[in-house]
Image: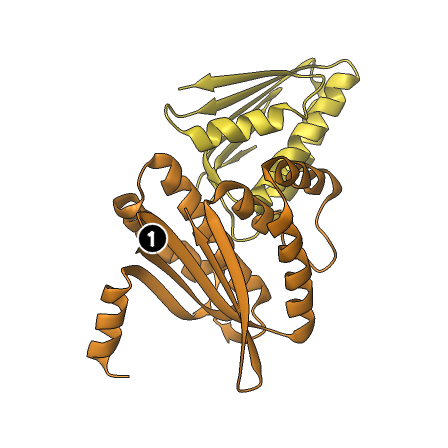
Chain colours: A yellow, B orange
Amino acid sequence: MKIEATSRTPLIEINSGYCLIKGECYPEDISEISIPIMKEIEQELLSVEKFVLELELYYFNSSSAKLLFDIFDKVDEAAADGLDVQIKWNYRSGDDSMQEAGEDFEEDIKNSTFKMQEI
Amino acid sequence: MNTDELHNILLKRKTFFCYSGPLTEKILTAISVAVRLEIGENAGNERAEKIVFGNFVEQAQNIIRYSSEKTIQEDETSGVGTVALSLSDNKVLVEAVNAVDEKQMNTLTRDLTELKKMDSAELKSAYRNRLKDGPPEGSKGAGLGFIEIARKSDMWDFEFVKEHGKILFIFKVWS
């Protein structure tokens, strides 16, 4: 699955155990991206041996924070069941707010590998 | 008011952006580009820039979703309100105004008074709990907007003004 970025939504790519979410994230209607993303991730988790979730966000609104939390929750649950799950949280150099957001999410991730990376 | 008075008032209060009227998600998409540029010019640093833009988006979406005055704009329901950005003591002030009904006023008063009392650790835990538990009844988003604003901003305040049988909700946040 690939959904191109718009000025308010990120590039989303989900393919063979890899999911990339990159860009701005404050959609007009969160369900326009949350429904396809959650559906695709759920299917992927059933069929892969390893799952890598890579995020590079510049700004996300509070509705998107809930979506991100739900994605992390879903993949972390799969990790608890034994799947090898890696989460990469990339943030642009000097972007304190995205660094802090990553640190916040990390606190609730119990079973996956979580890596923060300044890019 | 004469046009020159409007011009002078906005200049005097250092308002560098102001939108007033029916607001829709499409309009928000269009003005976001300009607002972001202007915030870039006026915010103290990159961190403040992000926070101010976040405040603007959350406030604009609150007007769209919760204003009790609605119109239909090209098949899209709009919320009528005002959102303004101004320079205030080396910070950027985001102000939002929209009409609310009595019930909304009571809920907002209860929730915002509660948030006012919280310190940063309590706000953080309120944010995490809301993420886990999902939105409260009546929310059209994640119910996180005001908690996020309270966590990240330097100062915020709210009030209600009653005029001509209408209740106006006024929210101000400085970053």
Q: Is residue B50 above or below residue B136?
A: above
The residue singled out by tag 1 in the image is B35
Q: Residues within 10 Å of mark 1 (few under 14, many from 20)?
A: many
The x, y position of residue A100, in whole percent, is: 51, 29
Q: Note whether B1 is above or below A85 in the view shown.
A: below
- Residue B67 occupies which quadrant of the picture? bottom right
Is A119 left, or right, of A33 in this rendering? left
Residue B110 in picture, x, y percent from top left: 68, 60
Give the x, y percent position of residue A95.
40, 29
Chain bearing tag 1 is B
Farthest-out residue, bottom: B164
Residue lying at 29% horizontally and 44% vertically, measured from the top left: B40
Q: Is residue B11 visible?
A: yes
From the viewer's side, name the closer residue of A48 and B121: B121
Residue A57 shows up from this direction: no
Q: Is residue A56 above or below residue B127?
A: above
**Mark 1 is on which residue type?**
Val
The secondary structure type at the circle numbered 1 is helix
Could you say which is closer to the camera, residue B34 or residue B153? B153
Is B73 or B81 nearer to us in this picture? B81
Look at the image and tell me in which quarter the C terminus of chain A lies: top left
Point 54% across, 27% down: residue: A102
Q: Relative to residue B113, is residue A47 drawn left or right?
A: right
Residue at 62% in and 19% down: A17
Q: Quadrant of residue A75?
A: top right
Relative to A101, is B159 above or below? below
- Please identify the quadrant where the N terminus of chain A is shown: top right
Image spot of residue B101 (x, y percent): 64, 74
Give the camera-side residue of B138 and A74. B138
